[in-house]
Amino acid sequence: MDDLSAVSLILILAVLLILDVIVYGFGAAVRMLRPQAEEDENEEGSEQGASREREQKLRARRQKILSSVMRNQADYADTIQLVTACVNMVVGAVYGIAVSRFLLVRMEQFFPSGLQEGWAYALSLILSWLIVLYVLLVFGVQIPKRLGGAHPERWVLRCGGVFHVLMIAVLPLTRIVSGTARGILFLFGIRKTPVQGDVTEEEIRSMLNEGHEQGVIDQSEAEMITNIFEFSDKEAADIMTHRNDMIILEDSMKLSDALAFMLRQHNSRFPVYHENIDDILGIVHFRDAVRFREEHHEEEDKPLASCEGLIREADFVPETKDIDDLFRQMQSRKIQMVIVIDEYGQTAGLIAMEDILEEIVGNIMDEYDVDENHITPTGNKNEFIIDGRTPLEDLTKRFGIEFEDDHYETVNGFLMEEMDKVPDANEHFTTDYGGFRFHVLSVADRQVQRVALTRLAPSAKGQN
C-alpha cells in the first residue's frame, strides 16, 4: 500500500508539473509571439510545396488561436495566475509534507542516537520546502519559459487548445477572484485598474533581455531598442559637440581661403563667428560656398561677411533641450545643424541631425569619416591607451568602472577633479580608481590628451 501511495504521489506530481509547464510555457510563448514570424512560416510552407488547402487550414487555425488570445488577454492572464497559484499551493502543501516525512525517517536512520524532536522536524521541513521550491522553479518555471520563448509559434499551436479549455474550465473562479479584487480596490478609491494589454518599459526591457539571451533578438537590435528608451532621457548637452571641438570659420576669412579650409575638413556645414565663438553669425554650407564662387568669381577674395546671402541664419537651442523634442523640431523645419547655448548665453557646442540619429542607431560612418577610437588596446591585455575626451560612460560599459560624481563627463574632467587643478604641460599625474590605474601621458592646451589605463591585480585592488 505504501509503494502504491508513493507511485500515486509521483504520478500526480508529474501531472501537476506538466500542467505548470503548459501554463508557463504558453505565457512565455504569447509574450514572445510575433505575427510577422507567423506569416513568414506560412510563406516558407508555400515555397516548400505544401498544398493550398492544408496551408489555408493551418493559417486559419493559427489565426483563430491568436485572435482568441488577443480578445481574451485579461482572462488568459488571470488563468495563468490562478492555475500556477493552485499548482504551487498543492505541490507545496502535499509534497512538502511528504518529503518532510521521508527526510525525517532518513534522519532517524543516520542519527541512531536521535535528535531533539523539534530540531529534527524543523530541519526536515526546511529541507523539504527547499527541494520542492527547486523542483518547481527548474521544471515548472525556467524550463517551460525558455522553451516557450524559443519556439513561441509552435508552442502556441500545440498548447493553445489545451490552454483554451483550461481557461474556460476555471473562468467562473477567475471572474470571482477578479471581481473580489476590483471590489476591494474600489473601497480604496481605485475605480479603474490598468488595462491588461498595457506594457511598461520595464516589461519590454525584460522581454528584450530574454529574447536576446534566447537568440531571438540580435545584439544590434537589442542595443537599438535600448537606445530608443534612453533617447527621451537625454538633453542637448549630452550629445553636442563641445565648443572646443567645433570646426568654425571667422567672418573675416576670405571666401577662397574658407573654401580651401572646408576642403580639408570632413564636414559640409560650418558655423561662422565674429571675433569670438560666442558670437555666432550663422552657418555656411560648403555647397553654397562653391556655387557662390562660381556665380561671383570676382568676389572670391571678399570676406565671408561681405558675401551677401552666403551665410544662412543659425538656429539656437538651450543645452537643457530634450533631444526628442529637438529631433522633431529639426525634422519639421528641415534643419541639419543647431547651435547650443548655455545658461549665460555663450556657445556651448553644436548638434547636427546625424548626432541625434547616432543616439539610436549607433555611430554612422561615411567614406570621409575618421574612426575615432578613444580606447586603444596595447600588447598587454590589461593595459589600454585612452583619449582624454573619452566619455566616462564608455569606460563604464567596457570595463565596469562606476564613477560616483556626475560633475564631469569625460576622462579629462575626472582626472582634473582628482588632481584638483588644471594640468600642466609636463603633468604625469597617477591615480587608482575602480580597480584601474590612470596615468597621464600627455597634456595640451590645459587638457589631458592621452592616458594609460592599467587593470590592477586583485591584491592591488584590495589595497586601493
Image: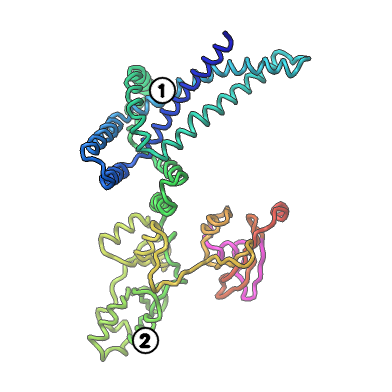
**What residue type is disc 2 on?**
Asp
Query: How many discs mark residues in the rendered view?
Result: 2
Name the foreground residue: 44 vs 113: 44
Q: Find residue 440 and report its horizontal and vertical position in percent.
A: 63, 69
The quadrant in which the C terminus is found is bottom right
Image position of 464 (left or right of 60): right
Residue ID for mark 2: 257
Boundaries of the magenta span: 407-431
Image position of 253 (left or right of 93): left
Q: Find residue 400 and report its horizontal and vertical position in percent.
A: 57, 53
| Front: mark 2 or 1 | 1
Residue ID for mark 1: 82
- Identify the residue at horizontal 29%, vertical 81% (top origin): 289
Q: Find residue 84 and report its horizontal and vertical position in percent.
A: 44, 24
Task: Residue at the far right: name it.
Answer: 113
Task: Residue at the far top: name it.
Answer: 1
